[in-house]
Image (spheres, helix red, strand yellow):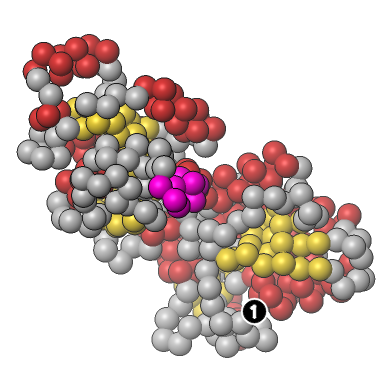
Amino acid sequence: MNNTPNSNRKHIAVFGKTNAGKSSLVNSILGQNVSLVSDIAGTTTDPVLKAMELIPLGPVLFIDTAGLDDKSELGELRVKKSKEMLKRADFALYVMDANDLDFNAFKKMKLEFKKYNIPYLLVINKIDNISKENLRLIESDCKDALFVSTYNREGIDKLKNEIISKIKEDEDELPIIGDLVPYNGKVVLVVPIDSEAPKGRIILPQVQCIRDCLDNGIKCYTVRDTELASALEDIKDIDLVVTDSQAFKKVSEIVPKDIKLTGFSILFARHKGDLESFVDGAKSIDKLTKDSKILISESCTHNVSHEDIGRVKIPKLLNKYVGHQLTYEYRVGHDFPEDISKYDLIIHCGACMINRKTVVNRVNFCKEKGVPITNYGITLAFLTGILDRSLECFK
């Protein structure tokens, strides 16, 4: 579980005012001192991320944020960084000090949770510092809150169980391949080995597809594009072929029309984002002109080679399709612009290094601003004329 990528973990963000005990709460849940704790307001500056296994839920990522009322010299920047975590959060804890019950501040954050569709729990901390009579009064006013003391760990186990229960209630994660191919079915994964392929291993989306096949009792065969033709002769009754996006055109010519074909990026467009919106976004390519500006959004940093999909292959194919040299800008990781009005199209990577909530929020933001968004695989399928074929497996 410790090796599970953060992108595959449920993100649990902890919010609240300074000195509410957010960091102490994270430490208590984790059972270790991960976040720096102090009586000095504003001890936590940048968000602190810590992965753990929350049994029986599985791998999660806790995000400890700076106080939302930080009045220090850099307070405004810290609060902004804290609120940026809303875009990643699958679940939120709002922590209040039992001696400082600011329900107006909580009400403001509830609006933020609603905006980003984040389920949450209200946690009232430091109950060891108030009288039993005051605690009873607060409990009567805050019937949905969880009451804890990070000093003596009172209520921590109950809070853990409630987090697990709430996240399970909200859990609705699509499989990658499992619902597209029947039990005991056959899938062929086409993995080109070129300068972009890491030596000695295969990349994360390919690993995740293999695991999803194993989880769903699907037989999975992995081949290079150079051995695909002979593999298709060896393996009968294939239900689906999945290829790396950059080999779409070549693989489409090899795979018979009666065998369904799609790409890793297209599978992840559905698993990590919004397939329908991405397909609609690709259709806007036909509206691009010589003055169009394109944003390429990459979820990870990497060395750029002559075979790079986002920085070389897609721009080259797109320029050829439109008939003009277009303008491209690039953003990496969680650096997604707040002002996207200048872009005519946003092309997102497969998002294997960021969580689904981040991608869905970006898609919704683009919809709100009227800017089309698509992803690498769908763009390549569109530009090579095989988009319709690559979507048949979802029908």
Q: What residue is rendered at 29% in x and 20% in y?
A: 144
Q: In this view, does 333 lie to the left or right of 339?
A: left
Q: What stretch is highlighted in magenta?
A: 72-82
**Which residue position holds label 1?**
308
Query: Residue 95 falls in which quadrant of the image?
Result: top left
Question: Amino acid under label 1?
Answer: Asp
Does the magenta-highlighted stretch encompass residue 351? no
Please say if 133 is above or below 243: above
Q: What residue is rendered at 71% in x and 78% in y?
A: 312
Does the magenta-highlighted stretch encompass residue 80? yes
Q: Position of residue 220 (x, y in %)?
A: 45, 68
Please say if 381 is above or below 144: below
Q: What residue is rendered at 25% in x and 31% in y?
A: 97
**Dot 1: what SS?**
loop
Most common secondary structure along the magenta stretch: helix
Q: Is residue 1 left or right of residue 365?
A: left
Query: Residue 250 falls in which quadrant of the image?
Result: bottom right
